[in-house]
Image: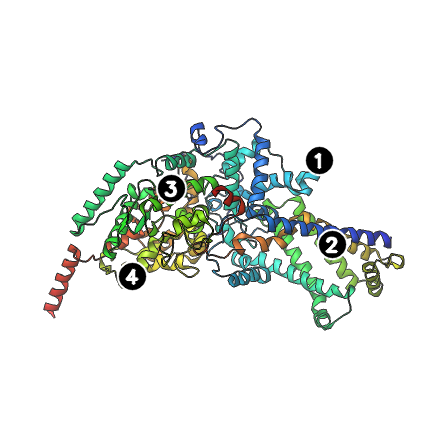
């Protein structure tokens, strides 16, 4: 175990913490090496005149992003957000209060981009309006605390002006990348994605072998020739899923759940070895250009394979990117202008009677609504399930046709295949959900301390339902949440086995036509009717 | 002195309108390249208008967050709004709306100052808010309390010649500089001076939250990224 203390559960519901200044000032992630930086078009190491370059880049972003401009101006320091961040709750470090985190950048903005800050600073009075020079101390603070934000947007729900700290931390990381100070974890992974096609750097042959193995596993279990096809030209559906689904637990069980649902629905589908990654960490580092490059792999694969429909697997930030940004950065969606040659190239090919892209939960939900899936809920009767709303799904995207579908649809899917379902504290779910603690590019071992501490509010809410409602299963719909919980649950004395993928629950209860499970059920039913 | 005050108000007015106008132009002309509404978000334009309306009129998000900040903030802003409407009587003939609001406007002055003092107390007493409070936050509160208190003084302690004040502003508005004459009341002078300062710092300070909220992409965007392609001009350049 590590050299830090897991936070103690507070009395529930918790009252705001007393401040411990600089409690996590020592935490910052490994710095990207020159090769990680350069492959993304950033300078390899901190450039000589970085102060000037950083201010220039900030000016550039202020002209490109209305959010940044408006949010740096508008904060009145009312304090509404101060107790809302899970990292603040877990660390008590005041710089983890959203407004204080923003102020790390706002102070520099005021110094270089506002009349009051520029003028007062000439007389050494910049402090009156909180203006600060850009210097090494400030940069180090940025590097530390902008990597203690998972960009979960919980603060933005409670801000009277909707100020979104994620926008600020993305901009800060983009600026740092541009002066040569990048984060190793995100930038290294993005390089692999852009070179090989997924975050793991898993090449086509390995992927093919893995998928074949899972197909066999399902066949052993169900007696049905379920396959996980790869690079099938002319398939109707392209599945884009986080690469963690190919190798990590419980992600794999989710992937097998999707395969069963596709098989039962009788649709033709495929994965792509060229675009074998839903994750797009470019969002975390605030890089529009890299986000576009990564998303274009998916666009290219879709065009190459000639698919009619794109479905996205269980992943939080990936669904935000897919739902909210794909249409913008790569034209993957609907409703492009007639003259928009770039977007029309793919959009002409897609079937717009479906949502493009579609979330796997939307796909399954739709089949359930149409009565096309049969479940034996008893398979999940040993479980009392609760659902963790992923921050990016909850506050950065939607499912279905109605606002809030992202909350209703996964719950409806779970309830369709489980008899025992309980929600956690209303202040910790849906739009008020807490981040798992590992989002936003923080899912790396060098940030283990902040990950464990940031998980505190979610773990407290889980403890509450586990103690009082008998919850023994935590269902997630995000690859990062799953990987984070798998690591963090033991720190809080929960068994790792309580964590499941949402489509794992689906896969376990699904009674596929012609399967062993169906035969068993029919026998049981026949016996039951004989007894009558 | 009267001419000096008139000049001060001309300058303050130009800086306020010009400054806020410039900031609004700047917000307007800066693109929002990505769809980032905080969801669940309205799926129609009308829904967005309703959402922003709730934020502006009811402070909905703040209410979700913290009832004390909401209460004091709401008292101050509603009080200020009523007081401002009531001050319309110095610039125009008193119509039915002003007549109706007159009694509320008087007490609104107290609500406004009480709200401000509540917010100020939080800045001192609540550790988290004390941490994020800077000198300018105290100064702006002092300015607003100063304006409110001096205004209340003239209403409830020592009346000033408001008819003369009205004549002053009407002459000012007609650029009738020769006829300018303000009552020589120090409380009035202070009140007017602080108001002019407030007008000048408005576009230079956090008071920009007032136009800012209308331009906040997390609040003013329609949630329809799958249905309609949204692209900023600088981003479209990358596709050429």
Residue occupied by mark 1: A122
Give SS at disc 4: helix
Query: In 3D space, how far apart are the residues under numbered discs 2 and 1 (Cα atoms)?
Result: 28 Å
Does residue A321 lie above or below B87 as drawn? above
Query: In 3D space, how far apart are the residues under numbered discs 3 and 2 (Cα atoms)?
Result: 60 Å
**Position in image of residue A290 (x %, y %):** 45, 39
Query: In 3D space, how far apart are the residues under numbered discs 1 and 4 (Cα atoms)?
Result: 66 Å
**Position in image of residue B45 (x %, y %):** 52, 61
Query: Which of the numbered marks, if any, corresponds to residue B146?
Result: 2
Residue occupied by mark 4: A368
Give SS at disc 1: helix
Nearer to the camera, A288 or A3: A288
Query: In 3D space, how far apart are the residues under numbered discs 2 and 4 (Cα atoms)?
Result: 64 Å
Q: Nearer the viewer, mark 1 or mark 4?
A: 4
Q: Nearer the viewer, mark 1 or mark 3?
A: 3
Residue furthest out toward the right: B178
Give SS at disc 3: helix
Mark 4 belongs to chain: A
Q: Decide: few, some or many residues near mark 4? Use Cα within 10 Å; few <14, some 14-19, many ≥20.
A: some
> Looking at the image, which residue is at 26% across and 36% down?
A206
**Position in image of residue A143 (x %, y %):** 51, 35
């Amino acid at each position: 175990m590590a050299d830090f203390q897991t936070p103690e559960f507070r009395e529930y519901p918790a009252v705001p913490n007393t401040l411990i200044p600089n409690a996590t000032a020592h935490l910052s992630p490994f710095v990207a090496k020159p090769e990680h930086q350069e492959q993304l078009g950033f300078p390899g190491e901190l450039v000589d005149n970085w102060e000037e370059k950083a201010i220039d880049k900030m000016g550039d972003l202020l002209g490109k992003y209305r959010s940044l401009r408006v949010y740096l101006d508008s904060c009145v320091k009312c304090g509404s957000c101060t107790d809302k961040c899970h990292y603040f709750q877990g660390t008590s470090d005041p710089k983890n209060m959203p407004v204080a985190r923003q102020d790390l950048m706002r102070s520099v903005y005021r110094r270089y981009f506002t009349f009051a800050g520029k003028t007062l600073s000439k007389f050494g009075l910049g402090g009156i309006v909180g203006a600060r020079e850009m210097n090494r101390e400030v940069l180090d603070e940025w590097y530390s605390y902008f990597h203690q934000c998972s960009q979960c947007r919980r603060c933005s729900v409670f801000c009277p002006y909707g100020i979104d700290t994620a926008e600020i931390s993305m901009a800060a990381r983009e600026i740092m990348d541009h002066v040569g100070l990048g984060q190793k974890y995100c930038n290294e992974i993005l390089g692999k994605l852009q070179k090989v096609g997924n975050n793991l750097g898993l090449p086509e042959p390995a992927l093919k072998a893995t998928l074949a193995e899972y197909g066999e596993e399902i066949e052993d279990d169900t007696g049905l020739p379920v396959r996980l096809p790869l690079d099938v030209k002319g398939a109707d559906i392209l599945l884009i899923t986080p690469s963690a689904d190919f190798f990590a637990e419980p992600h794999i069980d989710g992937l097998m759940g999707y395969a069963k649902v596709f098989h039962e629905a009788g649709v033709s589908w495929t994965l792509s070895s060229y675009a074998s990654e839903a994750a797009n960490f470019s969002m975390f580092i605030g890089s529009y250009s890299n986000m576009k490059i990564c998303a274009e792999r998916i666009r290219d694969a879709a065009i190459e394979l000639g698919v009619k429909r794109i479905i996205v697997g269980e992943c939080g930030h990936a669904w935000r990117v897919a739902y909210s940004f794909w249409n913008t950065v790569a034209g993957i969606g609907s409703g492009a202008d007639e003259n928009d040659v770039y977007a029309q190239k793919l959009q002409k090919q897609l079937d717009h009677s479906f949502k493009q892209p579609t979330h796997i939960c939307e796909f399954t939900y739709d089949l359930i609504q149409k009565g096309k899936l049969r479940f034996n809920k008893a398979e999940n009767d040993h479980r009392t399930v609760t659902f963790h709303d992923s921050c990016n799904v909850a506050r950065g995207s939607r499912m279905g046709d109605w606002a809030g579908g992202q909350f209703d649809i996964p719950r409806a899917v779970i309830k369709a295949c489980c008899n025992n379902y309980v929600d956690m504290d209303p202040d910790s779910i849906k739009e008020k959900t807490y981040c798992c603690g590992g989002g936003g590019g923080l899912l790396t071992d060098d940030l283990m301390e902040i990950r464990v501490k940031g998980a505190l509010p979610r773990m407290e809410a889980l403890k509450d339902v586990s103690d009082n409602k008998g919850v023994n299963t935590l269902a997630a719909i995000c690859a990062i949440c799953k990987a984070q919980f798998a690591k963090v649950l033991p720190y809080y004395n929960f068994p790792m086995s309580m964590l499941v993928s949402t489509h794992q629950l689906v896969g376990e209860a699904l009674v596929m036509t012609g399967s062993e499970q169906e035969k068993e059920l029919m026998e049981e039913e026949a016996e039951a009717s004989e007894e009558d | 002195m009267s001419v000096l005050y008139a000049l001060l108000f001309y300058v303050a007015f130009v800086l306020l309108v010009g400054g806020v106008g410039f900031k609004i132009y700047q917000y307007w002309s800066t693109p929002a390249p990505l769809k980032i509404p905080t969801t669940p978000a309205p799926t129609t334009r009308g829904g967005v208008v309703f959402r922003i309306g709730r934020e502006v009129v009811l402070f909905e998000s703040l209410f979700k967050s913290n009832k004390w900040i909401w209460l004091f903030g709401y008292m101050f802003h509603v009080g200020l709004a009523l007081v401002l409407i009531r001050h319309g009587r110095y610039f125009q003939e008193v119509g039915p709306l002003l007549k109706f609001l007159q009694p509320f406007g008087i007490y609104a002055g107290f609500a406004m100052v009480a709200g401000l003092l509540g917010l100020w107390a939080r800045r001192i007493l609540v550790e988290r808010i004390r941490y994020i409070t800077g000198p300018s936050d105290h100064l702006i509160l002092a300015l607003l309390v100063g304006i409110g208190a001096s205004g209340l003084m003239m209403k409830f302690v020592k009346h000033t010649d408001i008819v003369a004040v009205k004549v002053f502003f009407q002459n000012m508005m007609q650029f009738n500089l020769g006829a300018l004459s303000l009552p020589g009341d120090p409380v009035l002078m202070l009140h007017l001076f602080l108001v002019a300062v407030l007008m000048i710092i408005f576009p230079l300070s956090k008071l920009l939250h007032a136009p800012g909220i209308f331009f906040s992409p997390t609040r003013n965007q329609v949630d329809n990224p799958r249905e309609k392609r949204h692209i900023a001009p600088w981003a479209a350049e990358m596709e050429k």
